[in-house]
Image (tube, grey):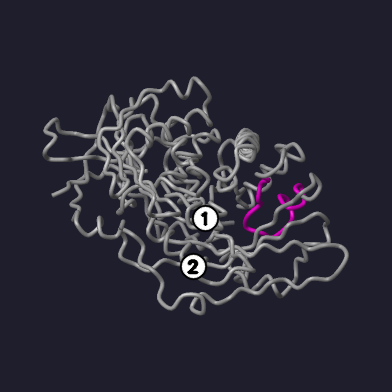
Amino acid sequence: MLMFTFVTKNSSSRHASRLLTCGGPCTVSIMSVFMDLNLIQNQTEDRSGLKSLIETAAHLGFSTVAVNYVFEPTTKKKQNIPSPTPINELIDQLPIVQGRSRPIRVLNRLTIVMSDSSHYRPTAAEYRRFDLLAVYPTTEKLFHAACMTYDVDIICISVTEKLPFFFKRAPVNGAIERGVAFEVSYSAAIRDATMRRYTIANAIALVDTCKGKNVIVSSAAEKRLELRGPHDAANLSLLFGLSDADAKEAVSSTCRSVVLHAERRKSAGGIIHTTKTSPEETPPTPDDRDAPAAKRAKPLETE
Amino acid sequence: MRRDADKEEAAVYQRVVRKNGAPYHYLKTHLVLEDESVRLSAVELKLFIISGLKNLYGEVGAALTFDLLKYNEDTLSALLRVHSRGLVKLWSSLTLLGSFQGQACCLQGPAGVSVPAGAVRKQS
């Protein structure tokens, strides 16, 4: 849905403005591009389904999407982790994002459905073939471990059943500190009224605990018609208890930080900051001298 | 179908900042159905939207007043007007509408969705 506000009374010149916040006064902020980090890759279906999904996502204005490969290990027999299909094999030419005149960026994502701690193998080489790594913990113990120790990018929240455990503040804060995001997907809510109750209830429980930080909203769409536009998703996440600003970030800048977190995880593992240490090279500026002593930059002690 | 509508309206953007919230908000929406041959009248569309509101917000939500200002039966695109108070409710219920008479459907914004915030869309 597009939201318009008519700014002229003259109805023949159809001016309309779009507001960033919903319903309230308009605030303008710098926004990053929209992302949907969960398009389900259906193993049984042919490629045309995924192709039309990506085309629809580009049409709706998503600049980056991630194709999600769900891996559900069972205890009985050993299964192979799926390997991602390179995107140029799926689609010859990537569709152009609506309004940005730039082709859509497609990432690969692996989601591990965990019911036992042995399902996540930190050193598995198979994980390195994916751009993003997500886990879906089904018990409280695994949720705690995923938040505090696992080197993943996304923790999925159950949307199809009643919350199996209570979100405690300690692991959730730990995950926020480490830059791991929580994901709520909305396509189950579109499919079924009961799922909708669970989605909203679980999302509100999560947002209460994490205070709206590090939450991403994604589609988990299998079909073209289950995908919604980025503004629709942002408006929908207001229902989950997010504030206007957090709702926008849930489809844009939080997703961006997830992608950056994934890049950090795949590379050597850190960012190096360099700062000047010698005080002689930075004489205080006139502004600095006028400032009260407490606000002046402290000269470094060199002992 | 949508692509054709896209080509017709060459959009020009200009930035406008509002200090006060507007009394009404207008939603331009477009119904996409699995079976593209299905046509429905304006009354049916309004009833469909009200049923969505009722599903999500119950009787109180169904009592939300909104107007269907324009409706094009050929392209299934509609212009809704709603009081700003009811915007989030109406919009979210439109987002969560997923099936029309048993077939999958989707209410989307018009082409050119990704307009930066505060931009004005001027249609020629």
Residue numbers of the magenta segment: A143-158
Vertical placement of residue A8 versus A47, above or below: above
The x and y percentages for residue A209 are 65, 35
The x and y percentages for residue A153 are 62, 58
Residue A294 visible here = no
Vertical placement of residue A52 versus B85, above or below: below
* Quarter-of-image position of residue A43: bottom right
> Which amino acid type is marked by label 1?
Ser
Q: Are marks 2 and 1 in contact (CB under 8 Å)?
A: no
The x and y percentages for residue A189 are 58, 42
Secondary structure type for disc 1: helix
Mark 2 chain: A
Q: Tell me what residue is drawn at x 77 percent, y 39 percent.
A: A165
Mark 1 chain: A
Label 2 CA crowd tier, 10 Å (few <14, some 14–19, many 20+)? many
Q: Tell me what residue is drawn at x 44 percent, y 47 percent.
A: B106
CA distance separating discs 2 and 1: 16 Å
* Quarter-of-image position of residue A79: bottom right
Are the numbered discs 2 and 1 placed on the same chain, yes or no?
yes
Q: Tell me what residue is drawn at x 37 percent, y 54 percent.
A: B37
Q: Label for residue A106?
A: 2
Vertical placement of residue A168 versus A265, above or below: above
Q: Label for residue A135?
A: none
